[in-house]
Amino acid sequence: MEAIVAKHLDDMLRPRRDICTCKRCRDDIYAYALSRIPARYVTSEAGAMHTHIEQVAVEQSSLILKELLNAIQVVSSNPRHEKQDDRQNAYKLLMKQIMLDRGVDFSQYRERMLQRRIAVRMRERKVETYPEYLQILTHEPQEYEALFDVLTINVSSFFRDDAVWEKLENEIVPEIIGRKAPAGSPVRIWSAGCSHGEEPYSLAIMLYELLETHPRGVRFEIVATDIDKACLRQAGKGHYRRDVLRNVNARRLKRFFLPVDDEFIVVPHIKTAVHFEERNLIHDAGISGVDMILCRNVFIYFNRSLQEQLIMKYYYCLAEGGYFIMGNSETLLGEARELFREVDAACRIYQKLKAA
Ligand SMILES: C[S@@+](CC[C@H](N)C(=O)[O-])C[C@H]1O[C@@H](n2cnc3c(N)ncnc32)[C@H](O)[C@@H]1O
């Protein structure tokens, strides 16, 4: 019986990336589940073992699975690490070393999120403690690439969230162009946290189409920034797999991408319309005098006070009447609520108000 429970537990924990599965937690889950399975099924009596295992395997596997699920939930929401304080100190040391080695300060990122992600690498490298993982980072600096990969999840896609792009194309960007046209000044946009370039290239395609027939020949400039060097390298190449292009319609795909083997490459005139730069949103200066800032699905990593600071930074970077676009699960906080007008709540589009 115990063997069956242990086997089910291994199968259930293997794909879990969201909880701690160190030996101590695993033992706790196992013990908790066993304590809740009726005693008549928990036996190690040699004679009865064989028939018992068969009976349990067939009749009771759903009970075991249910109890294991329950145990995983209970234990993972409150892991009983006896040396929790030591572990917390070791975590702080690890983050300090990352800051010293790579100059990246994660102190204002959400701690639980960081710990869950670091646990993914620790499992991969088969270590259970932060000091052991620090040893790996010290002796194999290439581990940093893999760590940053999981810490700053770079998932994105072209024209992500249809409704937002429709609103931008039909209302927001034409309104900006209308304001810029009389003076002939360029439309300036900042894509902050641009990942592999999917968002700024989507913008470039949209602006190219909106402006190609414009009688006044209005130009546009897009600056795209990210903290992740590897992402930016990839963005500069402009090569994409089919799945991140799922929202690109057939007409645009044909016009703005070149199919090469099983990838698509952004055409040169769209590629050169985006200027990529490595910038840390927290410590580096922003891009000022811009008409629109897209910072989508980036705030989810930051704690509340950092989010508030960044929104204020964006406020000062935006030209008067400029737009700020957030991700679907993000929202304006603090003082900024008085400084922006909500243009579209569902699409998270806000407009900078005139200074009073
Ligand atoms: C989920 S992607 C968002 C991509 C795109 N904006 C979108 O919504 O599809 C988040 C990006 O934020 C970047 N990021 C995280 N922390 C950052 C920081 N402190 N400074 C700049 N970029 C950061 C990550 O490297 C990652 O590429």
Image (cartoon, rainbow, N blue to C red):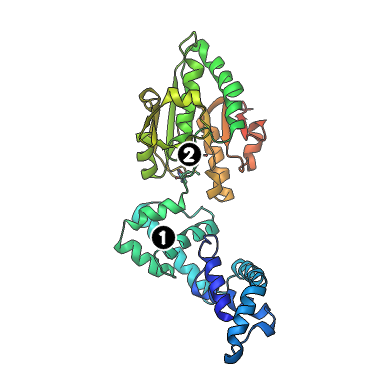
Residue linked to disc 1: 96
Q: Is residue 98 left or right of residue 291?
A: left
Q: Quadrant of the C terminus?
A: top right
Which element carries disc 1, helix, strand or loop? helix
Q: Which amino acid lies under the numbered mark 1 shown in the image of this protein?
A: Lys
Q: Is residue 129 above or below residue 1?
A: above
User: Which of the two discs, 2 and 1, labels the residue nearer the N terminus?
Assistant: 1
User: Percent from the top left, x then y, of residue 341?
Assistant: 66, 30
Q: Quadrant of the N terminus?
A: bottom right
Q: Residue at x 60, y 29 (%)?
A: 352
Question: Is ligand 1 within 8 Å of the beta carbon of the residue shown at mark 2?
Answer: no
Front in this rendered view, residue 249 or 86: 249
Residue 243 marker: 2
Q: Work out how far the residue at label 2 is from the one at label 1, CA to CA, in angstroms.
A: 37 Å
The amino acid beneath tag 2 is Asp
What's the residue at 61%, 84% (across, down)? 51
